[in-house]
Image: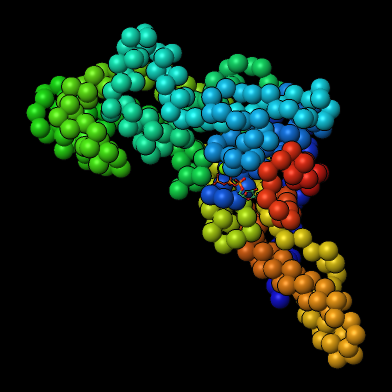
Amino acid sequence: MVPPTAELRSPQLDLDAVLADRAIRIVVCCGSGGVGKTTTAAALALRAAEEHGRRTVVLTIDPARRLAQALGLTELDNTPRQVKGLQPDSAELQAMMLDMKRTFDEVVLAHTDPKKAEEIFANPFYQAMSSTFSGTQEYMAMEKLGQLRARDEWDLIVVDTPPSRSALDFLDAPARLSRFLDGKMLRLLLAPARAGGRSVFNLVSASFGLFSRTVTKILGAQLLTDLSGFVGALDSMFGGFRERAEQTYRVLQAPETAFLVVAAPEPDAVREAVYFAGRLSADRMPLAGLVLNRVVPVAAPQLSADDARAAAARLDGIGGHPATADVLRVHAELADQHNRQAAVSGRFLRAHPGVPVVRVPAQPADVHDLDGLRAIGSTFA
Ligand SMILES: Nc1ncnc2c1ncn2[C@@H]1O[C@H](COP(=O)(O)OP(=O)(O)OP(=O)(O)O)[C@@H](O)[C@H]1O
Ligand SMILES: [Mg+2]
């Protein structure tokens, strides 16, 4: 058995104190895929609105359908919607789902005249890039966050982040965007497009390897015309886009922001969390702490797994107490699981000893309604 001593030494993360802190205006939940980022973001936002009286908006990315419904997000229209059923009903919470293609379209509309925008939208190259270019979702999350903050209608913006294969994509967005727009790739695209010739095709395929097959399929012979139109438009438009992404990056570094790394107590998720926390500190991003989600709760922590098993065996020997013996065995299983989780989480605590941690118990079922979110929120205190 692994004693959870490392766990005990980590400072407790008080999420209620984070939500109550009026100086904090943005909370970003990040972490690897499937660990509970969206759930945590929604639960935090609900609690901020209901318990702390803050006008809150939560920007979610791909919420599960039933959770989306509970938040009143029945259509993907990229604007914040009032969440219904709050307690008290004077509480103010809005929610929105990020539609990356639509956010991209909004950027285009904001920076070109309607006729030019129509041309860009019709361009197959734009269509491919706005929906499939790796990293587009991260850029668009940045863009949307910048937009929401600029509206200044909320005390608190809670941001869910995309399940990036690399958990760092979100942070990398402005830098990558800058590289993409200023750098080699755009020049590669521009130069041969001006010169014309078949080499463009190869360069484009190489640069946009990720979706070159789509591009090839969609574009065919139209490629050159489409590409020069597209690149010309991007060229004039993206200056502002990049500036805004950099501005948002600086906002993320400011004390008004609190980053939460969310992890499940599993080896892969914890390894990513270790890396992510390191990267946040390297980028001087304000890390509030680790949310260890779906921790197996143990009802009687003073009773060890071994003692419970021994007791169950004794009861079997005496006979006549099968139910109690079963309960003891279930307890032993849970205690084992809890200890394994503690050992796994210990890796994070050793790598980042000063970082506060909160443990959110695994709920008996998936979290898909406001009550479920409230139950999660009640463990934040
Ligand atoms: N503490 C919890 N107890 C029980 N179920 C949970 C808990 N937290 C999250 N879940 C469930 O786990 C699933 C994944 O959660 P969620 O969608 O929030 O993860 P995510 O990190 O946003 O995933 P993705 O990376 O795919 O966006 C959901 O079905 C959710 O209801
Ligand atoms: Mg999610």
Q: Residue at x 71, y 53 (%)?
A: 365
Rendered position, 314 above or below 286: below
117 shown above or below 318: above
Percent position of residue 330, x then y: 77, 72
| Quadrant of residue 92 within the rendered picture | top right
Q: Residue at x 43, y 13 (%)?
A: 110
Residue in front for this viewpoint, 64 or 138? 64
Q: Position of residue 277 (x, y in %)?
A: 57, 47
- Residue 157 shown left or right of residue 326 in the figure: left
Tell which of 368 and 354 is nearer to you: 368
Quadrant of the frame with the C terminus: top right
Residue 206 placement, left or right of 175 = left
Judge whether 2 appears above or below 182 on screen: below
Up the image or down, 19 lies above or below 39; here it is above
Point 77% across, 30% down: residue? 85
Which residue extends farthest left? Answer: 197
User: Which residue is at the front of the view, 36 or 324?
Assistant: 324
Residue 115 in view, yes or no: yes
- Residue 76 percent location from the top left of the image: 53, 28
Q: Would residue 84 be found to the left or right of residue 134 on screen? A: right
The N terminus is located in which quarter?
bottom right
Residue 136 versus residue 246: which sits nearer the camera?
Answer: 136
Q: Residue at x 81, y 25 (%)?
A: 89
Tell me residue 202's x, y (percent). Answer: 16, 38
Judge whether residue 260 can be spotted in this image.
no
